[in-house]
Amino acid sequence: MNDIVDRLLEELNCDTVFEIPIFGGIPIYESVVVTWIIMAVVFLLCIIFVRNLKVENPGKKQLVLETAVQGLYNFFKDTIGEHGTAYIPYLMAVALYIGIANLIGLLGFKPPTKDMNVTVALAVMSIVLIEVSGIRQKGTKGWLKSFAEPMPIVLPINVLEIFIKPLSLCMRLFGNVLGSFVIMELIKIIIPPVLPAVFSCYFDIFDGLIQAYVFVFLTALFIKEATE
């Protein structure tokens, strides 16, 4: 058990890869470097996939790409409602990032979502977008008035929700990713070496993609609620 605790603490520890020598030294953590790698790969894939696009007689690669993008767009459109379609590109980008970040552990990298700083940043970005969408749709006066709906007595609860939503998004993503690591370590102790590989496929692939889906799905629902 002590060994599991030590390994868990090691997973929670944010290793500094290097420091930027300004302002007394700015530490660059492993999660940041891995995020840069993900960004570079996605950027490179975007350049490759969007080359030689055609309006007429598109190739198979373009048709597959358009089908995937349109499928994601339609999914989020049904979830977020008509007033929130402007925020679909953000949701698609976040879903892509979290999905890759959760799967990158299969390549030997430490998933950035195991760093609470990353999940907090994603949650703060989402909650800011949620509140901004409400202000844009209802106006500042209408947005402030919505905190007293359906009756003024619920005002404190509605204000508290502003802080509860990002905490919920953050801890759900961080807790599930970290929880899967703990379960895998326990399985490796009590089950022969062959079977953990099966469970690893579930936690590293299926569960990682599910967490990406849940994060953006809840964000979309909150935006729909704010813009109704």
Image (cartoon, helix red, strand yellow):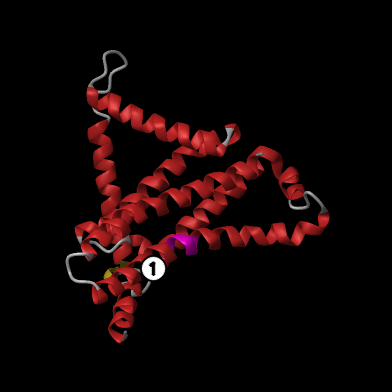
- Magenta-highlighted residues: 170-174
Residue 219 coordinates in the image, percent (x, y) = 53, 48
Q: Residue at x 63, y 58 (%)?
A: 162
Q: Residue at x 32, y 59 (%)?
A: 203
Dividing the picture into quadrants, the one containing residue 64 is: top left
Question: Furthest residue to the right?
Answer: 152
Any part of residue 85 in sight: yes
Between 104 and 46, the residue placed more toward the observer is 104
Residue 18 coordinates in the image, percent (x, y) = 26, 69
Looking at the image, residue 62 lies above or below residue 111 = above
Question: Furthest residue to the top?
Answer: 56
Question: Could you tell me how many numbered marks the image carries?
Answer: 1
Label 1 belongs to which residue? 179
Dividing the picture into quadrants, the one containing residue 25 is: bottom left
Between 4 and 147, the residue placed more toward the observer is 4
Looking at the image, residue 90 lies above or below residue 25 = above
Q: Kindly report the secondary structure that dominates the magenta region of the rendered protein.
A: helix
Crowding around mark 1 (Cα neighbors within 10 Å: few <14, some 14 to 19, many 20+) is some
Residue 61 coordinates in the image, percent (x, y) = 24, 27
Between 139 and 58, the residue placed more toward the observer is 58
Between 76 and 192, the residue placed more toward the observer is 192
Residue 98 coordinates in the image, percent (x, y) = 37, 52
Q: Residue at x 58, y 35 (%)?
A: 81
Q: Give the amino acid at mark 1.
A: Gly
Quadrant including the N terminus? bottom left
Residue 10 magenta-highlighted: no
Residue 172 magenta-highlighted: yes
Q: Residue at x 29, y 13 (%)?
A: 56
